[in-house]
Amino acid sequence: MWTGMLSAQQSNETDFTSSPAFGDNCTSILVGPKATEDGSAITSHTCDSWYRTWMQWLPSVEYKNDTLVEVYSGKMHTEYPAGKEGVEVKGKVKQKAGRTYRVLDTAYPCLNEKQLAMGETTFGGRDTMRNSKGVFMIEELARLALQRCSSAREAILYMGELAYEYGYGDGGECLTITDPKEAWIFEILGEGPDQLGAVWAACRIPDDEVCVSANISRIGSLAPLQEPAPAKQKKGKKSAYQPLESDNIMASQNVFAVARKLGLWDGKEEFSFWRAYSGKNFFGKMQNYANRELFIMQQLAPSLGLHADMDELPLSVKPEHPLSVKEVSRLLGSYYEGTEQDLTQMMRVPKKGRTLFSTEKWEDKDSIVSNFANPWMRFDEISAYYAMTGDSRWDWVRTIAVPQCAYSTVIQVRSWLPDAVGGVCWMSLDNPGQSPRFPIFAGGTELPAMLKICGQHRYRDDCLLWHYRQANKLAAVRWGICRKTLEPARDHFLDKGLRELPLIETTYQQMAEENEKEATALLNDYTADFVGATVLRWDELYRSYWRKFWAGF
């Protein structure tokens, strides 16, 4: 059984928010266009920690040649777009002349007007790779790439160039990048404390396959790329930016040399990016996966017989049935229900009709899951149950959906439609296993005011996050009862959006032929109305749960 990093035997005083299990945890599912029901390419992201929930559309800007643009760190934790607390200007970078694209500016920017979409997961990597003097954090690399690029391949090469010239200062990061035709996984680290630069690799996912990344480096072999001959360079001056490229693999020109220099690769064995630069997973095993990657791939390709004792999972698998936005959303909302990793199965009570205080023993077949059981128990709750039962199976499990999630995206991009309606970000805030999703179109220019405020700093009624969070957290207290109304409401809105999508696409195209400004307003208004409907429903759920439990829980 896969278990988490914090044992139930720990003290009941554990601060669960300071645990490494709580921190930089994200999950991304990347789907090629021939692996979906309708030909959409899909990327996704669960931003699973204390990151900002405000978002905005960055407008298009016209740059003159060599315009200097500021690059920041710390913006992921601000309360609103203009917030400066904790924000630092890391440097300024030159921008070539031309118009930038509009970008959906989430904590990790995720979509532009050209249907270029990104998901993200942090894998950390070896500490020896970090260089805090680097200008770029991953979110700023993503922002500039989305502003200047229209394809996944172009974005990867551009981010590599920026990191090479100005330095990468973040830990190991992964971006799952797709345009309507190609899906790529991109992993990047610093070049080490003595050299300002970056080491990176990128692999194109076969069009009919699915890749999963969840806080562990996933890229292995870089074949057919080969280590280049050492470049001649003048003393004190970098050589030209010359990434290694093939049709389906790209990497920084130093990817082999740095591993050799730092003693991470002997040059004899076949090179593996994850083995060299990431090493062990967070269970201390030399593997390129953990429970989330394994579970999702087992769900999609059960006949492969993937199991937890494998040294390495394939980077991607061909699913045994085509995927959809709805299925990717379901996977991101999973807590392994019905499996041995499902904590709710640990809290069973006798079936109705049995005497509560009977001395007669009862087996699991005579029991049901308690209404108090919820899959997102805190560490101190698990510790308490362990103390009461002494059952060593009480251990924390890192579910895919988590209650500390800031926001979650499922982004579909479609080659046969205009960019404005071809790209759709299905957004949710708070726990993706509980919250509804609403559509934001690539052609949008404005978001509801409630989305421009972060709810992580304090309770705010004018912040969208809290309208979901109140009902979600209350529902978890008696999950067995509340899920009967919350889950149908969650599914209703995604079903509604998908059902109405063809009408919006057709109406937009008809309106755009005569008045593009009014067509854009249609997209903005539809998102606002959709969000408003979810707020009304979740506010009603919140009130209904208080009415239901008026006499106590």
Image (cartoon, rainbow, N blue to C red):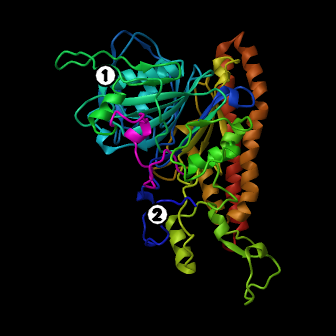
Kindly identify the residue that appears in the image at 83 percent across and 80 percent down: 353
Q: Is residue 108 above or below residue 11?
A: above
Kindly identify the residue that appears in the image at 42 percent across and 71 percent down: 13
- How far, Cα to Cα, is label 1 from label 2? 40 Å
Q: Nearer the viewer, residue 359 or 370?
A: 359
Q: Nearer the viewer, residue 303 or 19?
A: 303
Kindly identify the residue that appears in the image at 73 percent across and 16 percent down: 509
Residue 376 percent coordinates (x, y): 59, 60
Q: Amino acid at mark 1?
A: Glu
- Dot 1: few (<14), some (14–19), or many (≥20) neighbours within 10 Å? some
Residue at the left extreme of this rendering:
235
**Position of residue 419 in the picture relative to residue 232 (left or right):** right
Residue 334 percent coordinates (x, y): 65, 51
Q: Is residue 330 visible?
A: no
**Which residue is label 1 attached to?**
165
**Which residue is label 2 attached to?**
6
Task: Give the prevailing secondary structure in the magenta stretch.
Answer: loop
Residue 315 percent coordinates (x, y): 55, 37
Q: Earlier in the sequence, mark 1 or mark 2?
A: 2
Residue 328 percent coordinates (x, y): 66, 40
Q: Nearer the viewer, residue 294 or 189?
A: 294
Q: Is residue 136 visible?
A: yes
Q: Quadrant of the C terminus?
A: bottom right
Q: Nearer the viewer, residue 80 or 174?
A: 174
Asked whether 269 falls inside the magenta stretch, the response is yes
Asked whether 276 falls inside the magenta stretch, the response is yes
Q: In the image, which residues are magenta?
A: 266-290
Q: Is residue 335 above or below residue 150?
A: below
